[in-house]
Image (spheres, rainbow, N blue to C red):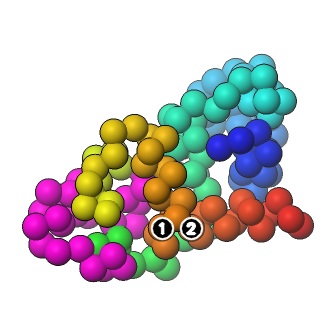
Amino acid sequence: MNKKEFVKARKILGKTQKQMAELLGTSLKTVSSYEQGWRSIPPYIERQIYFLLSRRAGICEIMRPCWELKKCPDEIKNICPAWEFNAGKLCWFINGTFCKSCSKKSWEEKIKLCKQCSVFTPIVKMIEYKQTT
């Protein structure tokens, strides 16, 4: 997530910088630093923002579980945390999921793949749309 996406996400969530800092459990100075580009946005903050966006937009309510969309075979479903925890609409939030039949080692690897996936793209499109309007 870059600084422009962070600002757009905050605005979509309808939060001031101070409110966003409280929501993320960080300082106002840190949020300001993210928005100015002085600090990179850590994975745990990016993940939390995407979660909040997914809840704000109600995206999870209209989505089908990832294993249905991706037509995962039983041998993959049975070892995937998204299946284990019945979180197929939030698979992008959970580490260790078996997207494309393999688990990613880092959040950066995982979210790069997720941003191309039909389960996660509604959230990405929400931010992209807001950037152009």
Number of numbered discs on residues: 2
Is residue 84 shown in magenta?
Answer: yes
Where 106 falls versus 38 (above or below)? below
Check the image and name the residue furthest to the right.
Answer: 133
- Mark 2 crowdedness (10 Å alpha carbons): few <14, some 14-19, many ≥20: few
**Mark carried by residue 117:** 1
Amino acid type of the residue that numbered disc 1 sits on in the rendered structure: Cys
What residue is drawn where x is 57% and y is 36%? 45
Nearest the viewer among 23 and 108 is 108
Q: Which residue is drawn at 58% across and 41% down?
A: 46
Which amino acid type is shown beneath numbered disc 2?
Thr
Q: Is residue 99 above or below residue 69?
A: above
Would you say residue 56 is visible in this rendering?
A: no
**Residue 6 image offset from top left, x and y in percent:** 73, 43
How packed mark 1 is, by other alpha carbons closer than 10 Å (few <14, some 14-19, many 20 or more), is some
Q: Give whichever of 131, 31 is nearer the camera.
A: 131
Q: What stretch is highlighted in magenta?
A: 68-93
Q: Which residue is rendered at x = 76% and y = 39% of the image?
A: 3
Label at residue 121:
2
Q: Is residue 18 left or right of residue 59?
A: right
Image x and y of residue 90, in percent: 41, 60
**What is the quadrant of the C terminus in the image?**
bottom right
Contact? badges 1 and 2 (CB < 8 Å):
yes
Residue drawn at x 47%, y 58% is 114
| Residue 91: percent from left, percent from top | 37, 59
- Pick whichever, 17 or 120, lies toward us: 120
In reply to whether residue 103 is colored magenta, the answer given is no
**Residue 54, located in which quarter of the rendered image?**
bottom right
Image quarter of residue 78: bottom left
